Amino acid sequence: MAVPGRRNGLEEEDDFEDDNALFDEDLGELDLDTPPHLRALASAAQLGNVDAFRLALDNLEGSIDQPVEDGDSALHLCCLYGHLPCVQLLIERGANLEAKDEDGAIPLHDACASGFTEIVQFLLSRANNADCLKRMLESVDAEGDTPLHHAARGEHDDIVRLLLASGASPTTPNLYGKIPSELPEPETEARRILEAAAAAVANAQHCQ
């Protein structure tokens, strides 16, 4: 999984007046990690330029789910950087919602970590059936984190609510034994929501 908090491949405070300079800068950053035939796709995914992204997909050789940067597929990158139109285009063209990156994360993990509620909602809505939705919500990365763990760690309240409403478990521990409610800072809304959800699960199990 690429690092959340970096938008368009640049630090948020960086500002470029010339879009071409921005594009060239991104291409330079991709040289070491991205195969030459995938650089246009990776750059368009980071920049969120839908026209350039569509053109890159039209010219793509191989699978739409192949890794383009640091083990991330194009769908992982678009979810990470928050480009909903590009995410929608990828899904329309058959991108796999459950494709895993080199850390075992699916695109939903990236959208949850970065706090993009609309993308999370879209991904969940495009699950083909209840089993697919369940697998997405229960998917764990290399550290045992579910998408809810990522949303909890980022204290993304709306996404936490959305995942719980969709059936995500608030009591699944990661490899370090942490359930999602233990990840937000104390006294935050995300922690309150998750603690209440975990308590409700415990009460329901006690009553059985």
Image (cartoon, rainbow, N blue to C red):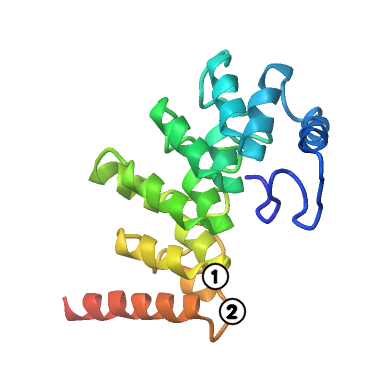
The residue depicted at 24 percent of the width and 75 percent of the height is 205
Residue 129 horizontal/vertical position (percent): 24, 41
Q: Is residue 40 left or right of residue 138?
A: right
The residue that disc 2 covers is 185
Of the two numbered discs 1 and 2 on the same chain, state the one appearing first in sequence.
1
The residue that disc 1 covers is 155
The residue depicted at 71 percent of the width and 51 percent of the height is 6
The residue depicted at 61 percent of the width and 46 percent of the height is 81
Residue 156 horizontal/vertical position (percent): 51, 67
Quadrant in the picture for residue 22? top right
Q: Which of 199 and 125 lies nearest the eye of the viewer?
A: 125
Amino acid residing under circle 1: Glu
Quarter of the figure that contains the C terminus: bottom left
184 up-or-down from 32: above or below: below
The residue carrying pointer 2 sits among few (fewer than 14), some (14 to 19) or many (20 or more) residues within 10 Å by Cα, namely some
Q: Residue furthest bottom?
A: 187
108 up-or-down from 155: above or below: above
Amino acid residing under circle 2: Glu
Judge depth for marks 1 and 2 and give the one in front. Answer: 1
**SS category of the residue bearing label 1:** loop
Q: Which of 207 and 153 lies nearest the eye of the viewer?
A: 153
Q: Are marks 1 and 2 in contact (CB under 8 Å)?
A: yes
Q: Which of 101 and 61 lies nearest the eye of the viewer?
A: 61
Q: Is residue 24 left or right of residue 145?
A: right
The residue depicted at 76 percent of the width and 37 percent of the height is 19
Q: Which of 51 and 182 lies nearest the eye of the viewer?
A: 51
**SS category of the residue bearing label 2:** loop
Tell me if I can see residue 151 in this picture: yes
The residue carrying pointer 1 sits among few (fewer than 14), some (14 to 19) or many (20 or more) residues within 10 Å by Cα, namely many
